[in-house]
Amino acid sequence: MKKYLGVALTATMMISLLGGCGKTEDKPAATPDQTGGTTGQETTEAAGGNESQGGGSEENVTITFWDGNWNEGSFEKINELWKAEHPNITIEPEYLVDDGMSDKYTLALSNGTAPDVVACALDWTTTFGNAGLLAPLDDYIAADGVDVSQYVQGAINASTVDGKLYALPFRSETYALFYNVDLLEAAGYTEAPQTWEEVLEIAEACTSGDVAGYGVCGSNYGNYSFQYITMLRSSGGTILNEDNTESALGSETALQTAQLYKDLSAFAPASMIENDNVANRTLFANGKIAMYMSGIYDAPEIIKANPDLNFACVMVPTANGAERSTILGGWSVAVSECSKNKEAAWEFVKFLTSPEVAKYYTNTFTGTGDPAVAFEEVDNAIVQPNADALAYAKALPSVGCIVGIRQAIFDDLSLTLTDSRTVEEAVQQLNEDVNQLLAGD
């Protein structure tokens, strides 16, 4: 998936710095009752201790904040709202480019030079929380009476490790199927596909000349892995077994899904191997792709590039009669364990994730599932299916090596696109690689 649904991490670096898999079961969503704090000295330390104060103090405090540069344009509005409530706390943001962002996070959190607040993709939160590099938020949440149940449950699940909550979400999204209404109608289809079998049929019918039926990602591990996992889940498959101790990527459904990805590539653009989802979005906006999967964040960019394009969205198709199930993507904010201003940092986390503020910062949906202000003028035929899809989105398994698993999915299965490996061989190798990751090898 593109950077907004999970920025690419360097998996080998993450694993070597943060250790093996750290098998942690996917925890249930925390509630105010479950996150009740402790008393006495332990609570005092959790809430800041002798650190520089900022939440309710008159002392001037400066806290640092890292996020991706795609959110930089929204900071002015956020800072205006923040200063009205917290005139004594200054936010110093640094907005990082996609390339190398994860490496910088990993090193800074590991060596104690990280900023006070970090914006993390959901699977980053799982990884960093497992490694103890983020500060637990439970005592702050209990002290301020924050209603954790208001947030999308999958985001809370992804941020909960060993019963402790390490982040709150400001952004939530999942995949939908984007389709060109005119291209489908020209091929004889007046309704969007509901199953992957129909997608394959329509993709073949729409492929003609320089128009491709389906936009397959051949590059970018994040894009590829999220799309494969989405297809897998919506076909009734899973990444891991029920207790997250073994790979389930050698199953018949996993094999079927890998074959589906390969079959769709026959109706993809000639540039498929080099294409990530940004390239697919551009081709779709230019009327050169009939269908592709992506998140709601693509809609404004498509409209900007081609205001006259007649397109819509539908929830991700299913296969094998399975119940729809997709990946919950998005971003959360956390307090670095090394922060010397944890109380002030918590105030910013609480502020940025509130629905009233997050709607100005996110370019998808807030952590509570409300649409961003940017979508007030976008056709409901585009927005509503993406909003409805959140009800079927679930976080990735809460294991420390989830990034490595996603990298393995890309490394092994993408070889089928160039016929360097058969689908059967690729799936077998993937299953072995994931089990090695789970074992901490």
Image: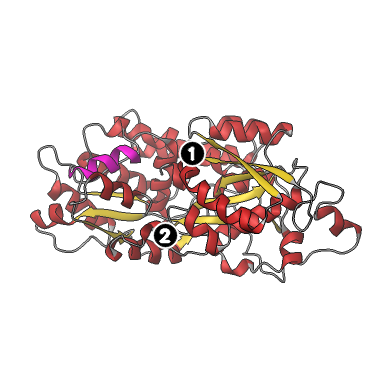
Disc number at residue 315?
Answer: none
Q: Quadrant of residue 21?
A: top right
Residue 284: horizontal and vertical position, in percent?
Answer: 23, 45
* Residue 329 position within the rendered picture, expressed as x and y whole percent measured from the top left: 48, 52
Q: Residue at x 23, y 54 (%)?
A: 179
Residue drawn at x 75%, y 47% is: 60
> Does label 1 or label 2 sit earlier along the sequence?
1
Is 83 or 154 nearer to us in this picture? Answer: 83
Front position in the image: 102 or 225: 102
Residue type indicated by callout 2: Val
> Which residue is pictured at 46% across the width and 60% down the height?
393
Q: Spot the residue most to the bottom.
A: 33
Q: How many residues crowd mark 2 within 10 Å: few (<14), some (14–19), many (20+)? A: some
Q: Is residue 269 left or right of residue 336?
A: left
Q: Which residue is mark 2?
A: 373
Work out which quarter of the rendered image holds the C terminus and state it: top right
The colour scheme of the drawn protein is secondary structure
Q: Is residue 280 magenta?
A: yes
In this picture, residue 364 sits left or right of residue 166? left
Q: Position of residue 232 (x, y in %)?
A: 40, 52
Crowd band around label 1 with a 10 angstrom C-alpha radius: few (<14), some (14–19), many (20+): few
Number of the label disc, if any, that sits on residue 69: 1
Instruction: Name the image quarter holding residue 177.
Output: bottom left
Find numbered disc 1 in the image and state the secondary structure of the residue it sits on.
helix
Left or right, 75 with reference to 215: right
Residue 324 appears left or right of 123: left
Q: Quarter of the image for the N terminus: give it.
A: top left
Magenta stretch: give its range: 277-287
Q: Nearer the viewer, residue 249 or 185?
A: 185
**Amino acid type indicated by mark 1:** Asn
Q: Residue furthest top?
A: 420
Does the segment drawn in magenta span residue 166?
Answer: no
